[in-house]
């Protein structure tokens, strides 16, 4: 998954066997979190983080490929 500010990737992470991921510390503000895999349609979720806030986002990817 990627964390994007506008169109720039500012963080990324790979899921573990259980599907969990951790981007570590990222900046506060409005961001887009994008989950991708070559066999699934990408999914984007917007989030606004406050200073020192922790957040959890769950994704359910749909089989298929993106165009």
Image (cartoon, grey):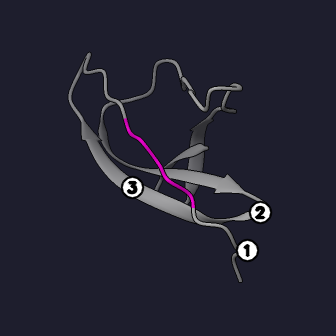
Q: Residue furthest left?
A: 50
Q: Is residue 14 above or below residue 48?
A: above
Q: Earlier in the sequence, mark 2 or mark 3?
A: 2
The residue identified by callout 2 is 39
Crowding near the residue tagged with mark 1, few <14, some 14–19, many ≥20 C-alpha atoms within 10 Å: few
The residue identified by callout 3 is 45
In the image, the segment drawn in magenta is: 57-61
Between residues 6 and 21, which one lies in front from this camera angle?
21
Q: Earlier in the sequence, mark 3 or mark 1?
A: 3
At horizontal 71% and vertical 83% (from top left) the residue drawn is: 67
Q: Earlier in the sequence, mark 2 or mark 1?
A: 2
Crowding near the residue tagged with mark 2, few <14, some 14–19, many ≥20 C-alpha atoms within 10 Å: few
Name the quarter where the N terminus is drawn. top right
Separation of marks 2 and 1 at Cα, in angstroms: 6 Å
The residue identified by callout 1 is 65
Q: Can you tell which quarter of the image residue 18 is in? A: top right
At horizontal 46% and vertical 19% (from top left) the residue drawn is: 25
- Residues at badges 2 and 1 in contact (C-beta under 8 Å)? yes
Q: Can you tell which quarter of the image residue 29 is in? A: top left
Q: Secondary structure at mark 2?
A: loop
Between residues 18 and 53, which one lies in front from this camera angle?
18
């Amino acid at each position: 998954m990627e964390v994007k500010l506008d169109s720039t990737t500012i963080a990324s992470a790979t899921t573990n066997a259980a599907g969990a991921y951790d981007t570590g510390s990222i900046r506060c503000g409005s961001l887009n979190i994008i989950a991708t895999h070559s066999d699934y349609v990408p999914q984007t979720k917007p989030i606004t983080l406050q200073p020192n806030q922790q957040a959890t986002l769950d994704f359910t990817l749909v089989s298929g490929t993106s165009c």
